[in-house]
Image (tube, rainbow, N blue to C red):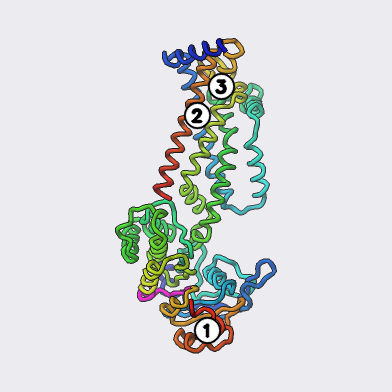
Amino acid sequence: MTAASIMRAPTTLLPLHVEGLVFAAGGRRIIDDVSFRLDAATRTVIIGANGAGKSVLLRLCHGLLRPTAGTIRWNAPELPGAPRRQAMVFQRPVLLRRSALANVIYGLRVAGTAPDAREALAREALDRVGLARLAERPARVLSGGEQQRLALARAWALRPEVLFLDEPTASLDPGAAHEIEKVVAAMHTAGTKIVLVTHNLGQARRLGDEILFMHKGRIAERAAAASFFKQPASPEAARFLEGELPW
Amino acid sequence: MNGLGAAAAQAIHLIGSGDANLIGIVLLSLKVSLTAVVIACLVGLPLGATIAVGRFPGRHALIVVLNALMGLPPVVVGLAVYLLLSRAGPLGAMGILFTPTAMVIAQALLITPIVAALSRQVIEDAWGEYREQLRSLGERRLGAAATLLWDVRFSLLTIVLAGFGRAAAEVGAVMIVGGNIDGVTRVMTTAIALETSKGDLPLALGLGLVLLTIVLVLNAAAYVVKETAQRRYG
């Protein structure tokens, strides 16, 4: 580490300022003039109907998509080529054809972790998600829930300041989903900012401190989770909860 | 029919008796074609991976050209290499025309586009699946290309075999740049062509059987490796 990077290190990635964000594709505004600020410590859950723009918003924030207009400004911008300080877990985990352990080590290698430190960090992360005994197993033959926990371990090993999750439990059974929620809660306790997109309102209640409710590419409502579920302020959110609650 | 039967019987006897002439031809064939495959992979695999994940002007044109080069006629490659290596040619001073080295060069030129074009396709498909995850981790394009090459390694095996099959089976290029010199540059395909025209059907047939067997065994081995690996690694 150089002196300059040590100087920079204490500066946090958060808060994130998003202003006038627009993302258009095929002549349609998928994200339509969205502005908000994300702070550390709270767990932000983004909900909304299919096609509301939740996943696209997440990808824009994480830098996987380029905005059509507007700005996404981190408190301390990530430098190109420097290790990422944010991570993302996708609905379908993408794992490499190598062992579970090697998948976590791979993430650490890309992040520039010193070679002799990688294995210990990777094993610790696997242990945190309960996969220590499957470390040597090829990643792609693990069960769906185990694969997603491995994706979380890969993210955790990087000690990200922010973790984006895009419907991480959408294709899992309730038992496996519960395991994922436990890990996400633990990462939050360890100090990682959680930004979660979910279709599961029970999960939104369990994991959310605040709710961002999206409707047709805009943020229709933003509220503390408790008050949102008790008494949504916007008619769109009220309709959404009414329609979704039985499920 | 009788002639064929007798020739086949003689051919099998020839193989069974370990005829030195036949063994020499087979070994030279393997040496030339395997060397060409190694060179084609060293160039073609990174090239295919780079084109698969890269974004640069002329990329689409390059893909079209590469795909077209898969159908390159061996005699044309042979002629081009011949012109390059002949005494009057730009590389004539090297004096390698009518040597196994010239044959390796011709075959490598012939199959590098095959390896590059097919691996480009496989890796581009994988890139579609891995892209967001690798970018999320902060992997750069060249790093991603290397990662993908390793991750689709079992699919690449089939491609490498296709390249070897093409190299081992072609006759036009090695005939022109090798000259089919007995004991020096005679390989299975050129020997088969020659012996057939001379009427020595047993030797031609014997070589044909060996060639088929080698290709068959290699493909079977690759199939088993690929299936086992995919079951193991998913």
In space, the residues marked 3 and 2 are separated at their CA atoms by 13 Å
Residue depicted at 42% across the width and 60% down the height? A144
Instruction: Specify few, some or many for label 3: CA neighbours under 10 Å numbering under 14, 14-19, or 20 or more.
Output: many
Q: Is residue B117 above or below residue B170?
A: below
Three-letter amino acid code at the position of disc 1: Arg
Q: Which residue is mark 1?
A: A222
User: Disc 3 is attached to a residue of which chain?
Assistant: B
x then y, percent, for residue B73? 65, 30
Residue A194 sits inside the magenta stretch: yes
x and y percentages locating residue B231 in the rendered image: 41, 47
Which residue is under mark 2?
Answer: B215
**Residue B20 at x, y = what percent?**
44, 14
Residue type, numbered disc 3: Thr
Q: Which residues are magenta?
A: A187-197
User: Label 1: chain?
Assistant: A
Magenta-span inclusion, residue A201: no
User: What residue does disc 3 label?
Assistant: B189
Q: Residue at x 46, y 32 (%)?
A: B218
